[in-house]
Image: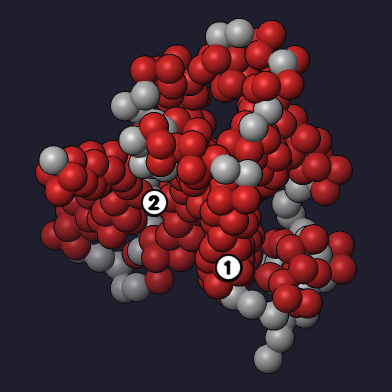
Amino acid sequence: MTEVVPVSRQLWSDWFYRRVRLPPLVFGVLLTAGLLALLALLAVVTGTLEHLTASGASWWETRDGRVTTLLCLMAGIVPTALRYHELGTRRNLDALARSGLWPGRGPAALREATSASPRRALLFGATGFLLIPLVALTVDLDPGLYFDSDYWGLPQTWIWVVGCFVTFCGGVLTYRVYVDARTFGRLARELPEVDLLDREALLPFARQGLRSAVPGVIFATFLVLNWSDPAFLVAVVSLGAIVLVQNVAVLLIPVRGLHDRLREAKREELARVNAAIRAQPGALEGSPLARRPPPDLADLLAWRRFVESVPEWPIDVSTLGRFALYVGIPLLSWVGAALVEHVVELVIG
């Protein structure tokens, strides 16, 4: 049964995918395949492929060939990542709504809590266009090239046109990631209470933080695959540093407020237990132990040890494992590319 999304929370992607009727992953693969086929056709028609063949280099071994191919991949990956981020954010909000952490606030109410603005998303996307000339200038080091008609061959035109589409979608994705991370951070601070016995209900905060780090990993992978090109050194180092800072920020924003609430809840509960050990009247009021018969000293000491052992971050081992895997994707991409290049050299040699 198709989910009915509140009108005020409908996105352009909701409208688009309802009409395309394809899963986001399938659409992304088809888009990449179509762009690669078009690029290959234009390379044959314009003679670009013949020129590269005459030079003795493969398409991937040249900067223009490598970057155009990577942009085809990114053109399918970034919009797909945007759509899956939107769907994942909705699932996490729905999970929080089902947990009953905010009495009286259902899934629709929590979805309305986000402050995402379509106009600001478009503005961020348009700002992403600046990334193409900035990276181009760090690589070419000569802005005069762009005013020379001989410069604008198929690879250069492809990089600027397809690159603008990629950076626009990337800008929108960056905006959504940041705004949604702030939404989860605000919801954490608005929690009426934190149940130390039910940390499972808090895991959507950690999952959202992990999901928010995915776009940075995608862009880092693109940068790492150009690491072997000395001309890309400035772009790789500078943009890589920005991506690293962004990833750390969007990972922490959804869970930092919850960390503060968990730490506060632990301190309050430990204060109650210590007061109960001192036999102060009404010390356990508001504690889970107050729902049971009066505990003896052994129970109080065991409960205090349990409360002290409760982690103050809502991140479990499996979540950390997935994050480590995502962080390792750029390194694996670089190693894989190096191995492929080495194998090709051995076969040709």
Q: Is residue 92 visible to the viewer in this orientation of the structure?
A: no
The vertical placement of 100 against 125, above or below, is below
**The disc labelled 1 sits on which kind of residue?**
Leu
C-alpha separation, residue under disc 1 versus residue under disc 2: 38 Å
The image quadrant that residue 346 belongs to is: top left
Q: Is residue 317 visible to the viewer in this orientation of the structure?
A: yes
Which residue occupies the foreground of this view, 209 or 17? 17
**The disc labelled 2 sits on which kind of residue?**
Pro
Which residue occupies the foreground of this view, 230 or 349? 349
Locate residue 327 relative to residue 167 in the image: left or right: left
Residue that carries the numbered disc 1 in the rendered image: 30
Q: Position of residue 139 (x, y in %)?
A: 51, 17
- Foreground mark, 1 or 2, reads 1
Q: Position of residue 309 (x, y in %)?
A: 23, 49
Residue that carries the numbered disc 2 in the rendered image: 314
Circle count:
2
Helix, strand or loop status at disc 2: loop
The image quadrant that residue 332 belongs to is: top left
